[in-house]
Structure formats: C-alpha cells, structure tokens
C-alpha cells in the first residue's frame, strides 16, 4: 500500500512540473486531411466534357481512398458536373468546382474558354399578346460540329414587352406582356446573338370591365373583373387591354384591384381597338358616421363569428351613411325597449344591440329601431338572431342576415309610412299594390338593371306588411323578405330610400342589382313570387321588422302610439 501511494504522489508531481499543458497526438495516418481536385489543366473549351478526379491524402502526403463524393459548381449554367465527376462546359466564364467527402471540401477554379462558334436563334417574328412561344438556340462550331451541351443565357432588351424564362439547355419560354418591340438575346460570355420580336394587340370579340362594389373608402381596395375574349374564344390577359382611370389621381390600379388614394367619383375604362367598356366607382373619405353594433345579449358573450360578422356589416353600412343628425342621451332599464342590457349613453349616430334569441323556427331574425329622435330617425335599435338556426348559415349569409336587420334598425321598412314619414308610402297594409314614393328612390329605380322593361308601379313594397321591397321585383336584394343562396346586393333603391327618410346617405354607395325576369314585361305585378334560381334559404324574413316604441325629445322619453307611430297624447 505504501509503494502504491508513493507512486501516485510521484505521478502528480510530474504532471505539475509540466505546467498543465498536454501534447495533442498526431492524426492517424489513416485519416484524410486534405482533398485535391485533379483535372487536366485549369481550362475547358466551350462545349467540351472532361473528367475530374478527387484524391484524398493524409498528413504525410500518402494517397487514401475516399468514400462517397459529392460534386457541385457555383453555377451549373457555366459548368455542369455529374455525380461521377464528368464536367460539361456550357457557357464562357470562370467557375469554382467543389467536391465534398470525409467531412472536407476540395476546390478548383475552372475556366471555360470560347472557341470559334456561331449561335442560331429560332422564334416567330410576330406574336399576338395572348400567345406564349418557345425560343430555341443552336450552337455550332465553325466546322459545323453541334455543341449540344452549351447553354446560352436568354433575356429580352425590353422586359416590359416580353419575359423570357429558361426551360432546358438551349430552350426558353417567351411570354408576351404588352404591345411593342423587343430583342430576344442569347448570351455566351461576351458574345450576344439577337432576334427581333414584335408583340401585337390581339383583336377581341368582346370586352367588359366590372367593379365588385360601387364604393370604397380611401385607403381600401376592391377587386375588378376584366373579361376580354378574342375571336377564337380565348380569354385574353389584361395586358391586351388598355385600362384607364378618369380623372387620374384618386384611384390606382394594382394587381387586379382598385386602391383609393383620394375621395371622388372615378370612371374605369377598358379599351382594345374599337371596343370600349366602362364602370364607375366612388372613393369616400373615411366615414364619420358613428354606427355601433354592440353585444346586447345580456346572457353570454356573442360567438366570435357573430362579432366578426358585425364588424363587416358595420363597415358596409358606414360606406352608405355619412354624418349623423343631433344626438340624444338615452337611458333604458333592462326590458324597457326590447333591450336585454341596460343603456345609459349619449348616442350621436345609431347604436344597435345584437343578441341571440329563441324565435319561431321559420324566422331567421328580427330587427328594428326602438328609440327614435324627434325627427323620426333612429337612435337605438335591437337585432335578434334566431338561436335555433343562425349557425346553419355560412359567413356570407350571416352577414346578409345582420345587414338586413340593421337596415330595419336604420328605418327601412320600419319608420316609413308612419308618423312624420307617412307620405313616403302610397297604400296601406291592406293595399293591393303599395309603393314607396320617395323622390330619390324613384329616381334610383331607373338605375337598376333591366328597369326599362318593368311594367309595374315603382317602387313596389311587400304586400300586407310594407316592411320590405316586394319579393318578386326585388328577389335577391338585401332588403327583400328572404335570404337566398347567392350574394344579396344593396341596391341603389335601398341607399336612396335612406336619403328620402332624412339620412345623409351617399347615393353612389350601391351595388349592382338586376330585376328578375319574373316581373319584366308582365301584365301586372304578381305578389309573393320568387324566381326559382333565387329560392329562399335559412328561414323567412317576413314579419321580422320591429317598430319603434320610444321617442326622445330634449332628453325626455315619450311612448309612441303603436298604430300611428306618433307620440301618445298625455
């Protein structure tokens, strides 16, 4: 034991004398420390093929065998290499050749040098704007030997006229972008071969342009649809058509969308030769109208998809409404005016309390103003969504439903024909042909698609209720008494009716609406007829219009007579 301990202490002493340093043992002679790339010279004639070899050596220079090698070049368009090291010179230039093996990289710079050759380009001289063509090249030596592996670089002198996209060695795709002239180029090193290309405007058979919505807010964008068809029935890209905005500066065209940068009305025109199509759009300053759609359920928070739909509906109605009339302070206890939550606020625009409620299964929702101003315009209203079936509607239909009910809150079908607004309606609830006679709505009716073929009295209201536009004439419009599968636009008549009721409404904030065939060139207007292609879905909207109950006059609440809509006599 004593001898073992003494030896251990001696060993520690020797280590201490070394100052703590240790010698690194040399790498084994079986380890590759360097990779050399071997080629016959450092240059290669354009079009030639040459074998490259990778050689591994150890620390003393002995040659060792390598395992898997991976070859690569910085630009295969100049020098391509196969997995087994065969190089192909494709274009003139200097390029680095790399080989990876055993965790090391070996490199060699290879120069591809020119040889006497000539390039031939094959492509049409003239193309239609709708066409795509191929650009082919052939490289041969002056002795006629074809250099099949040579890869010219392709481009165009004017990339706004045509775009060139390489496909394979010696082949490229040329896409015409706009009418004009450009040179197609094939480049090898410093040598360039050219071919002139003329892009012509494609003769069209038909042309149309349509904006998705009539209005947008400054800073927003909306899509437009351009349809151009040539005499072969092919859809032509928009580059074949000249798009212009007049006046300039208010709206810009960007990637199939119109972007509003300033307020005002703009005409979008599309031109191709003698063909011309136009559509109009109005850019509005951001609305100052304080329309608030709020959670008024009082039980549980509204579902997220309902809240998101409320935001979208708010944006749409704010495009229609501008400034509000004088506000009033509104204070309501729960249940005082169809409200499930208490209210105590000064309202300058319109506040809408939205809730889920158990309604008759056939009714999709209900809505209307509850508190109105002294001039008859709404201050506060309620919207109830049928808790039994609202979730069966997709997002677009949920938007249409809430948009419809908020329209009732704003007064459509709920304040016209009553109180001070009684003169806006011709015909009572039992009339055989009631109509809305507001001057703006009557003028707007003439802007509806196919309105010249309409033979009935304008603007027809739904029979027995007068709370909607008549179902046959306005089938598919947002304020018709039913939800349909297709999108339901807010027509010029709906927007104009708000102006007739006293709102500061933007008359250009409408969407295109075409009268259905069922009411055109007919001997009379048939009640409750809905075109088969617009069959109702998701429940009826008849009987959903709720009437106002309270008027606020200088801060005081006055109950309204349910029959006349006027304040009750004290």
Image (cartoon, rainbow, N blue to C red):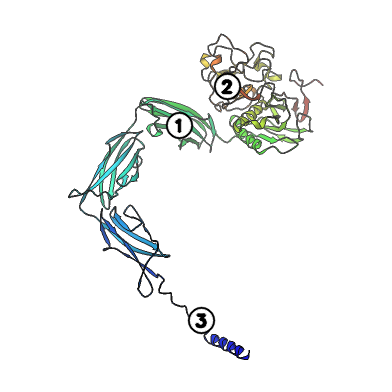
Separation of disc 1 and disc 3 at Cα? 84 Å
Name which of mark 2 and mark 1 comes first in the sequence. 1
**Along the viewing direction, whichever of 453 and 494 lies nearer the viewer:** 453
Q: In which quarter of the image is residue 321?
A: top right
Say which quadrant the N terminus sits in. Answer: bottom right
Closer to viewer: mark 1 or mark 3: 3
Label 1 sits on a secondary structure element that is loop
Name which of mark 1 and mark 3 comes first in the sequence. 3
Label 2 sits on a secondary structure element that is helix
Separation of disc 2 and disc 1 at Cα? 38 Å
Q: Name the residue under label 1.
A: 247
Q: Quadrant of residue 342?
A: top right
One can see residue 372 in this view = no
x, y percent for residue 414: 69, 22
Q: Mark 3 points at which residue?
A: 21
Is label 1 in contact with label 3 (beta carbons under 8 Å)? no
């Amino acid at each position: 034991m004593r001898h073992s301990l003494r030896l251990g202490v001696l060993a520690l002493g020797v280590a201490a004398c070394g100052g703590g340093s240790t010698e690194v043992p040399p790498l084994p002679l079986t380890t590759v420390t360097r990779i050399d790339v071997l080629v016959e010279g450092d240059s290669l004639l354009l079009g030639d093929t040459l074998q490259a070899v990778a050689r591994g050596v150890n620390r003393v220079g002995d040659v060792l065998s390598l395992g898997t090698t991976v070859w690569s070049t910085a630009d295969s368009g100049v020098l391509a290499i196969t997995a087994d090291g065969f190089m192909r010179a494709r274009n003139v230039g200097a390029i680095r050749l790399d080989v990876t093996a055993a965790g090391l990289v070996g490199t060699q710079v290879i120069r591809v040098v020119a040889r006497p050759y000539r390039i031939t380009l094959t492509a049409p001289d003239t193309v239609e704007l709708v066409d795509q063509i191929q650009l082919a090249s052939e490289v041969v030596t002056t002795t006629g030997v074809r250099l099949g592996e040579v890869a010219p670089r392709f481009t165009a002198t004017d990339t706004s006229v045509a775009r060139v996209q390489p496909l394979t060695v010696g082949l490229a795709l040329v896409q015409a972008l706009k009418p004009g002239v450009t040179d197609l180029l094939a480049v090898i090193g410093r040598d360039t071969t050219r071919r002139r290309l003329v892009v012509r405007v494609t003769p069209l058979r038909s042309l149309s342009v349509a904006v998705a919505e009539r209005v947008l807010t400054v800073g927003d964008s909306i899509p437009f649809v351009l349809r151009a068809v040539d005499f072969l029935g092919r859809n032509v890209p928009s580059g074949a058509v000249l798009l212009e905005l007049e006046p300039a500066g208010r709206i810009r065209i960007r990637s199939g969308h119109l972007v509003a940068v300033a307020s005002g009305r703009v005409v979008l025109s599309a031109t191709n030769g003698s063909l011309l199509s136009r559509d109009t759009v109005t850019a509005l300053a951001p609305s100052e109208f304080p329309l608030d759609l709020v959670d008024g359920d009082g039980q549980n928070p509204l579902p997220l998809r309902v809240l998101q739909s409320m935001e979208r509906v708010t944006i749409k109605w704010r495009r229609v409404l501008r400034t509000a009339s004088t506000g009033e302070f509104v204070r309501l206890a729960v249940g005082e005016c169809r409200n499930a939550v208490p209210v105590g606020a000064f309202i300058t625009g319109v506040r809408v309390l939205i809730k889920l409620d158990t309604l008759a299964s056939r009714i999709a929702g209900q809505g209307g103003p509850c508190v109105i101003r002294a001039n008859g315009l709404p201050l506060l209203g309620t919207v109830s969504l049928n808790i039994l079936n609202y979730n069966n509607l997709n997002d677009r239909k949920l938007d249409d439903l809430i948009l419809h009910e908020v329209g009732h809150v704003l007064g459509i079908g709920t304040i016209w024909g009553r109180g001070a607004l009684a003169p806006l309606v011709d015909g009572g609830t039992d009339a055989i042909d009631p109509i809305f006679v507001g001057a703006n709505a009557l003028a707007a009716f003439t802007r509806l698609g196919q309105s010249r073929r309409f033979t009935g009295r304008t603007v027809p209201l739904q029979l027995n209720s007068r709370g909607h536009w008549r179902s046959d004439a306005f089938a598919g419009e947002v304020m018709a008494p039913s939800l349909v599968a297709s999108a339901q636009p807010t027509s010029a008549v709906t927007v104009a009716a708000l102006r007739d009721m006293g709102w500061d409404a933007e008359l250009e904030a409408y969407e295109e609406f075409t009268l259905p065939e069922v009411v055109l060139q007919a001997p009379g207007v048939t009640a409750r007829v809905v075109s088969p292609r617009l069959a109702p879905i998701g429940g009826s909207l008849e009987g959903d219009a709720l009437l106002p109950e309270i008027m606020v006059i200088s801060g005081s609440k006055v109950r309204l007579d349910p029959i006349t809509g006027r304040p009750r006599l004290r």
